[in-house]
Image (cartoon, rainbow, N blue to C red):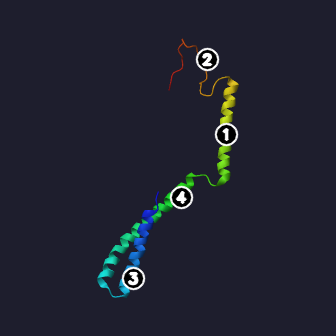
Amino acid sequence: MSHRPLVFVTGLTVGDYLLWNWSLNGNHTVLALVSGLTLPPLAVACLWLLTMTVARLIAHSARRPHGRAARTRHARRGAHHIGKQSRRAAAAGRPLEEPPATTTPAGSPSRKLAA
């Protein structure tokens, strides 16, 4: 996700605040009124975007394993798991994708009922 809206709204908020502060100090009443009325919605939008960005960063960091050790640990665990499957398939004398053979002959019906 792009951070452009956050940067843009934050810049507008800071600029509006500076304009409002300058217009109050310089007795520019109409400009102070207009910039003062637009400042609260911009501040709310800025805080909302900041909150959503922080929440996304937390969610993103929670989904990813941290550090190099976690990546190698996951890689080793995956390779070990695949190795076990292929060894079991080789010991059974069948390919990995092939389902195990049933002990019931093809012509006789099974007496077990499905739940």
With respect to residue 79, does 110 lie above or below? Answer: above
Residue marked by disc 1: 79
Q: CA distance from mark 1 to mark 2?
A: 32 Å
Q: Nearer the viewer, residue 101 or 73?
A: 73
**Looking at the image, is mark 1 or mark 4 earlier in the sequence?**
4
Question: Which residue is the extreme one toward the left?
Answer: 30
Number of the front mark, 1 or 2:
1
Residue marked by disc 4: 58
Q: Is residue 63 left or right of residue 72?
A: left
The secondary element bearing badge 2 is classed as loop
Q: What crowding class fits label 4: few (fewer than 14 Cα within 10 Å), some (14-19), or many (20 or more)?
A: few
Q: CA distance from mark 4 to mark 2?
A: 52 Å
Task: Name the quadrant containing residue 95.
Answer: top right
Q: Position of residue 50 (x, y in %)?
A: 46, 65
Q: Amino acid at mark 1?
A: Ala
Q: CA distance from mark 3 to mark 4?
A: 35 Å
Q: Report the disc number at residue 46.
A: none
Q: Amino acid at mark 2?
A: Thr
Residue marked by disc 2: 103
Q: Report the disc number at residue 21.
A: 3
Number of the front mark, 3 or 4:
3
Q: Amino acid at mark 4?
A: Ile
Q: Position of residue 22 (x, y in %)?
A: 38, 84
Task: Name the quadrant containing residue 24.
Answer: bottom left
Q: Is residue 114 left or right of residue 101?
A: left
